[in-house]
Amino acid sequence: MKNITIPQSYKSIIDKISNAAKENGFEVYIVGGFVRDLFIKREPTDLDIMVCGGKFGTDEQLAGINFSKIIAYKYKLRAPIVFERFGTSKLFIDNKEVEFVMPRKEYYEADSRNPNTQPASLKQDALRRDFTINALFLKLPDLKILDFTGHGVKDIKNKIIRVTDAANAEIIFKQDPLRILRALRQSLQLRFRIELKTYNAMKTAAERIKIISAERIRDEINKILIEDYPSKAFKAMREINSLNEILPEISKLKNLKQADGYCADRAFMRAMKTLDRTKNDIILRMAVLLHVDDPAEKHSTSGKDTDASRLSEYNSKNAKEAEIILNRLKYSKEFIQKTVSVIQNSIYSETYSNDWTDGDVRKFAKRCGGELDLTMEFSRTYYSGKNSRAKIAGLKKRIEVLKSKNALYNRPVLTGKEIINIFNKPAGKWVQEAKNKIEEIQLENPELTKEEAAAIAKAALNNK
């Protein structure tokens, strides 16, 4: 087909696959999103090869597996990783992962999105896929397009996401409700609209999202967060009632009563607007997503905006809730720590005033740790009021001045070993306590000498 050109980065791989198929009597097809991306001139990933036949008369269920082994042997590659239950295997060719599959149909249990499979025709395989735009086959080596749904090519041209089988749209989402999130994510990625019947079927199946593993939901959220205008997906999740299954802490905002004239829906929409204008960094965007103000609780601090301890308590509660959510979604400890740190410490930037000493600025930087830049960027985006912007700009300037003087962070005046030698005592908790006291004084007096530090440690230990 004239519109289809294999990108240079995959040409060698596809040539090797085509040659091996011809030599061994296999029919091979590129399938799925890779073909779609070729149509829309988007750099493709995730190369999936469907395999049929073979001159050795092997079981159809093993065609993909056996073909991948033949390629590995022919080109002296590492042995493929085999998944016998699904009749698939993965092989690295020219440092890119390629998956080999058989044509299959699927059967689902009521409480699982993981299907049982059996060999099928090409058409049956196309119809068991999620959307028409992902159900195109590209035959190798002649690059002939097979469009078994009859809508794939047309839907790509018209920028439409539609289920492969309109008569069974609800079943398609109920069998694998992860497809709901995939539809929303691909709508963002490709800037395609979701066809109405498909969208309504997503609504019907929304409650089934609870059968999806936390890891799968997490991965889709991550992909959504790094797209332009991620709010579109979260607004749609709320509209089809899937957000309540995924992030009930955020979804609940639509049911909150007004507090002091502050509409709960305004809180959600403000968060979504902020999310879209936040720098494309997954930690920053996650922090914004999970730091949605509860209007009733936040406005209970009315008249106490200068009470830093009260605002800190409010932010700490938000940070704790974020930690619970991220743990539930199986995020890594490092990711959770960074996101929680940004949420918890951001409030201090809003309470900044010209009365802060250099030591106060250093304390703020120390509290933020490695997330200082992220925290400042979060604050700049999230706290958008005129007064807040002025405070954050002032704090940022103070930080830059101290950085330029190499005076933002202090090196330890005394190491733990030096403290132990000074006191001639066995190591213990007292060493860290002494270091903490020294550091507390050093934040205000960065020129602290070793002798002065030793005197501070002695005084602290004597006062215990």
Image: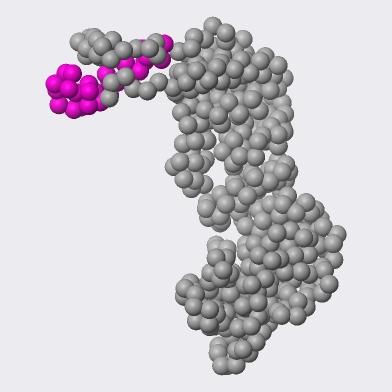
Q: Which residues are magenta?
A: 416-444
State the quadrant of the C terminus: top left
Rendered residue at 45%/41% (across/down): 334
**Is residue 154 in the magenta section?**
no
State the quadrant of the N terminus: bottom right
Tell me where residue 191 appears, x and y as whole percent.
Answer: 78, 51
| Numbered circles on residues, count | 0
Residue that protrudes farthest toward the front in the picture: 405
Rendered residue at 26%/11% (across/down): 451
Which one is nearer the viewer's eye here, 12 or 270?
12
The image quarter in which residue 449 lies? top left
**Is residue 422 in the magenta section?**
yes
Tell me where residue 37 appears, x and y as whole percent.
Answer: 73, 62
Whether residue 140 appears in this view of the structure is yes
Considering only vertical position in the picture, is 190 above or below 297?
A: below
**Horizontal relation, residue 347 to residue 34: left or right:** left
Which one is nearer the viewer's eye here, 436 or 193?
436
Residue that protrudes farthest toward the top in the picture: 355
